[in-house]
Amino acid sequence: MNNFGHRYTGLIERYRDRLPVSESTPIISLGEGNTPLIKLHNLPKILKKNVDIYVKYEGLNPTGSFKDRGMTMAVTKAVEAGSKAIICASTGNTSAAAAAYAARAGITAFVLIPDGKIAMGKLAQAMMYGAITIQIKGNFDDGMRLVKEVADKAPVTIVNSINPYRLQGQKTAAFEIIEELGRAPDYHCLPVGNAGNITAHWMGYCESSATDVTKVTESCAFCEGHCKYAGSIVGNRPKMIGYQAAGSAPFIRGAMVDDPETIATAIRIGHPQSWDRAWKVMQESGGWFDECSDEDILVAQKLLAQYEGVFCEPASAASFAGAMRDIQSGKIAEGSTIVLTLTGNGMKDPDTAIAQCTGKSVMVQIPAELDAVRQAILNNLAP
Ligand code: AN7
């Protein structure tokens, strides 16, 4: 069987039957979704634990983060409803995605970003895609409050994750994972900011397991509906684990945080919009929240890059930082299959990356002469 002539055209087309669109909905897509699920080969050996770890590399979406999954839906529905402008507050990735999908749709994007606290690549994206970029003297939470207030007073559609279509699009990542593994993983770890993504993944897993059960009970030739699974949702769903940066960890404190701080600027959020829903996810899935220090996050980011060739941004590395600790302590059991969502591409934040990689072994400066190059090679070959 070959796939000649089959062009992937994005997650709405692929999962049309599980998303709120109709035949006449004008789909705004950049071919998002269908991201690689990469099995880690080297790091599990270093951890000396018998676990299967897969990373869902969402940094390979069209604007470099998982936000594209939600934004294709949110902008599609905004355009369908006749909206001419969208607005969001953002720590950077939502604004990049909103700007790109608005450009694609021929509408205006307004993005509110925290002054000086967004990674350079994300700022470049918002500006280059042509969004009206509004820097506020405040943090993400201030921006979110303002966006909610202004949307009542101006003709703009909010495309933050309080827009329900965002989570609808984002749930498709869970569908892709189940299709590739043939089942849900035992654990699914994500970095948490507003907690929209962890909520969306849980929705996706629940919807999938419900359809699987219906299929089993309807098509099973043996039990005629009398087996132990009949009428119930079988538990092929993961425990969901949410990791926050220690300086921005309202779910760990059990209360909102007013002055969130972390090097992982994407998750520098103290007032999560999906607070209640994320607690429910933990209750239903049997998972947990935990926190990671900035230092652990940066170590995890570098390990993924240098041992597996996978470059994610700092916020994304929180999922690996936390998982490493929980695998080592045995809280995540040996023999488990674990999926980590790497939410954004490392190239979004070159400043943080380069700052970690100074030092002789990484950057060698020499004269432009053959002998000096030869010597640099000999000095730096692995033993
Ligand atoms: C790389 O762009 O909130 O828990 O405004 O960019 O669903 O909020 C970004 C969030 C994780 C957290 N990783 O996801 C924004 C924004 C990366 C992110 C998160 C974000 P949620």
Image (tube, helix red, strand yellow):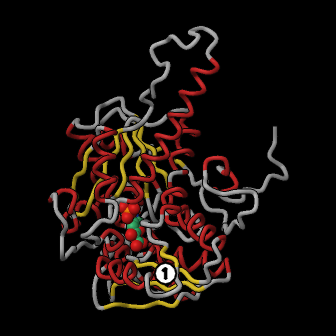
Number of on-image labels = 1
- Left or right, 61 with respect to 287, comes to right
The residue lying at 28 percent from left, 50 percent from top is 279
Q: Tell me the crowding category of disc 1: few under 14, some 14 to 19, or many 20 or more residues within 10 angstroms, Cα based.
A: many
Secondary structure state at the residue bearing disc 1: strand
Percent across and percent down for residue 259 are: 18, 77
The residue lying at 47 percent from left, 58 percent from top is 310
* Residue assigned mark 1: 87
Q: Residue furthest right?
A: 5
The residue lying at 33 percent from left, 88 percent from top is 116
Q: Nearer the viewer, residue 259 or 143?
A: 143
Q: Nearer the viewer, residue 7 or 223?
A: 223
Q: Toward which corner of the image does residue 60 lie, by quadrant?
A: bottom right
* Res. 331 in view: yes
Look at the picture and state if 214 lies above or below 81: above
* On-image quarter of the N terminus: top right
Q: Nearer the viewer, residue 224 or 364?
A: 224
* Res. 360 in view: no
Q: Nearer the viewer, residue 223 or 3?
A: 223
Look at the picture and state if 7 lies above or below 51: below
Q: Amino acid at mark 1?
A: Ile
Percent across and percent down for residue 69 are: 55, 61
* On-image quarter of the C terminus: bottom left
Give the quarter the ligand 1 occupies. bottom left
